[in-house]
Image (cartoon, rainbow, N blue to C red):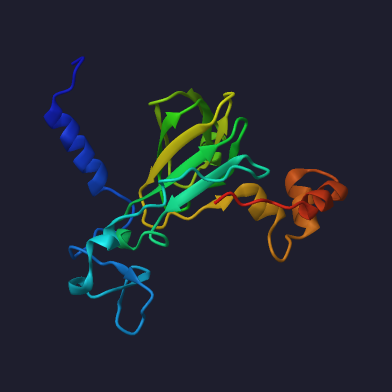
Amino acid sequence: MKFLPISFIILALAAATAFAYDPSPLQDICVATKDTNSGVFVNGMFCKDPNQATADDFVFMGFRNPGNTSNPLGSKVTPASVNEFAGLNTLGISMARLDFAPGGLNPPHTHPRGTEVLVVVEGTLLVGFVTSNQLNNTLFTKVLYKGDVFVFPIGLIHFQLNIGNTYALAFASLSSQNPGVITIANAVFGAKPPISDDVLTKAFQVDKKVVDYLQKQFWYDNN
């Protein structure tokens, strides 16, 4: 069984697609549109008349150029979800391009509606995710090199850090047309209005001055 037959691989990929998180579509295409007068509301978005769809609705060119990593995190995520790529509507998938300067970090975050599969194209990344309380918040972490693939289960906190001395590039595929993203530090210390000091000091077991300091920081969004 050293080499799996190609038919088994095809069946495995088909099963993975069949069990995507978003509901399966009941029509061939349902290109998202902002024209609420002529569109039909389906699964969170309005769809244009399929007879009016063109090939341009099914192409996304936002991955052609590197993302700008000149920011405090040293990383840039370029998403291709239904919000940027109308042709994905009702298909249950999306993608993202991740660019990293040396030392660049895609900080701990979650995707509440999608599992993520990441492939490294250039550079070296330290990646990991943390399980829920059910599994004692166990950290699964690995150093990835060019061509390596890692999966982050739906809803779990995860991160990617460029530990190499050169630029790094990765692409991610997600099992939702709109997986969402919650960056932990931004959500906790950058909430508007702010979360009560009483909540945060007790939750993190730190002095109020520490909480006040963190809430005054500028929490950069690299998406």
Q: Is residue 206 visible?
A: yes
Q: Residue furthest bottom?
A: 37
Q: Nearer the viewer, residue 47 or 112?
A: 47
Q: Quadrant of residue 37?
A: bottom left
Q: Nearer the viewer, residue 33 or 7?
A: 33
> Height in image: 49 above or below 165?
below
Residue for point 57% across, 32% down: 161
Left or right of residue 93, residue 205 in this image? right
Residue 177, position in %: x, y?
Answer: 36, 56
Q: Nearer the viewer, residue 155 or 57?
A: 57
Left or right of residue 26, residue 202 in this image? right
Residue 56, position in %: x, y?
Answer: 28, 61
Q: Residue furthest top?
A: 2
Residue for point 45% across, 45% down: 65
Residue 209, position in %: x, y?
Answer: 87, 49
Q: Is residue 152 visible?
A: no
> Height in image: 17 above or below 180?
above
Residue for point 17% across, 73% down: 51
Left or right of residue 74, residue 178 in this image? left
Q: Nearer the viewer, residue 20 or 202?
A: 20
Residue 186, position in %: x, y?
Answer: 66, 52
> Height in image: 198 above or below 130?
below
Which image quarter is the N terminus in? Answer: top left
Residue for point 51% across, 46% down: 77
Q: Residue furthest front?
A: 65
> Height in image: 140 above or below 62?
above
Count of numbered circles in the view = 0
